[in-house]
Image (spheres, rainbow, N blue to C red):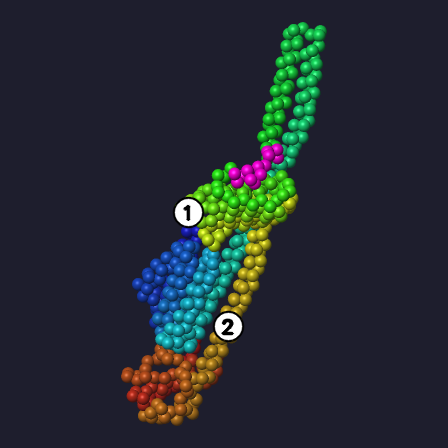
Amino acid sequence: MMGAVWVRLILWLCAAVPAVAAAASSRPGRLAVWEVVLYLALLAGAFVVVRRRPAVALGLVLGAWLVCYLLRVQFDSAVGVVALAPALAITSFLAGRHAQDPRATAIALAVAEVAGVVVALTERGGSDTALAVTSGIGVLGVVPWVFGRFRRRYAELQEVGWEHAALLERDADNARNAERTRLAGEMHDLVGHELARAALLVGALELEPTLTARQREAAGTARASVTAAAERLADVMQVLRADEDEPVAAIEEVVARSGLDVELTNGRGTAIDGIIARTVHRVVAEALTNVIKHAPGAKVTVCLTADLQLRITNGPAPRTRAVGSGKGLVGLAERVALVGGRFEAAPTGDGGFEVRAKLPERPLPRTTPTHVRRERTEEEIRRSARKTVLITSVVCAGIAIGVPGYMVFDAVTSVLTRQQFESAEIGRDEDDLDLPLRTRVDNPLGVTAPPGADCRYYSTHANPFDADRHDLHELCFRDDRLVSKQWLARRSG
């Protein structure tokens, strides 16, 4: 427990460093001190609840990242992206790792994606901001989340492996105990025979007429001791062989002893194998005991078919039910699996409960729930690995193709050519000018518009990747008339 606390504390510190650095930065989009304190408190709360409420924790951090980015996108988008980027990636991974049902966390990612895109398109920066939101949530949210889901499946496979190892060890112990019991039985037969022979010989000696009274008394004492030793040996072996020698009560006797109002249907007309009969006895007895504890007064039906399908059903409880540990059903499942059968137990639609078991005619090699769970977990981890690779590839390919594609689209559709720029005369009405449908940016960093003027910024050429890609044509209007224009040479680096 303490180890988990230390891990979360270290993760919180890793998430806190970029946020603190964003407050210490001199860039225009720096965080205020109160914002840093608020974000750090929110992250601490998210890391505390992420195990129990992964969707809530993920939603909080997604909302914080969106607010931090969208509020600064017009000043310095880099600060808005980086400040909470590690926090979002860590929380997304933990949310995927701890979520038993992935749907809630997946919905949180989808809602954040849609909300961010809508706000970007309507309020903050337009399509380029929407693309940045999509890419950010994809890289910092979706990809770590799918890796968290894969890690969960892998941990489940490890758990099943250890459980299977413990089961094998227990089977080995059971085999050793069974062999010891068998050897004890054999020793009883051998030693018992020798003791009986010794008692017979001593008895014959006791009747020898040449013995004195004292010697005859000693022989009688020896015979009695040998006979007592044989009886004690028989008692010990009776205890050791109790499971094998104890008579098995018929299903009718088990039902009668329960004292419940049970409707019994026994369709098995032939004898049942001893071990299978004991399993039937155990399942019926445990199921009826559960009815007494959890549904006293409920109507109960017990049905055993000719092919050894056993079904115990009870109706809803007329009185308050007791709270059980569930260990009884786990024990029944293990017992049925030991003989190669199948076991199920689940509530019924009317509020009752049903226990079902399908037993073989003879005990079969065990197919335990652990084996079934291991196979299912292995299949799930393979599917999870495929999904992880697929989703990561789709997100990375989408960003690798989408971002350059959008950059080309943005540059091409916002080009104001040199001829158009030179033909735009000061004082002309905006509607009379031949201008592109889109602007390149709304408020470029480091550029100040003339007082009272509304400026438009256009691309100078269609290539967004060369050294002149940041150059802009600036046209400023006041009362819809052009009041100034200039070529902004803005070299990167």
Assess disc 1: are there few (<14), some (14-19) or many (≥20) residues with their C-alpha within 10 Å of its C-alpha: few
> Please, what secondary structure does the residue beneath circle 1 have?
loop
Among the 4 quarters of the image, the one containing residue 485: bottom left
Q: Using residue 197 as the reference point, say whether residue 349 is left or right of it.
A: left
Q: Overall secondary structure of the magenta stretch?
A: helix
Query: Which residue is label 1 attached to?
Result: 318
Q: Residue at x 50, y 61 (%)?
A: 147
Residue 280 x/y as whole percent: 57, 42
Sequence-first tag of 1 and 2:
1
Residue 170 in sight: no
**The magenta stretch spans which residues?**
244-256
The C terminus lies in quadrant: bottom left
User: What amino acid type should be assigned to the residue bearing mark 1?
Assistant: Pro
- Disc marking residue 386: none
User: Which of the 4 quarters of the picture holds residue 241?
Assistant: top right
Asked if the stretch drawn in magenta spans residue 84, the answer is no
| Residue name at image x 60 percent, y 26 percent | 235
284 or 33: nearer the viewer: 284
Question: Which residue in the rendered view is the most extreme toward the left?
Answer: 452
Q: Residues within 10 Å of mark 2 (few under 14, many from 20)?
A: some
What residue does disc 2 label? Answer: 398
Give the image location of residue 244, x and y in percent: 62, 35
- In percent of the image, x 47 and y 44: which residue is there? 291
Most foreground residue, 48 or 110: 110
Q: Height in image: 270 above or below 377?
A: above
252 within the magenta span = yes
Looking at the rendered structure, the kind of residue marked 2 is Gly
Q: Residue at x 37, y 71 (%)?
A: 70
Q: Quadrant of residue 80?
A: bottom left
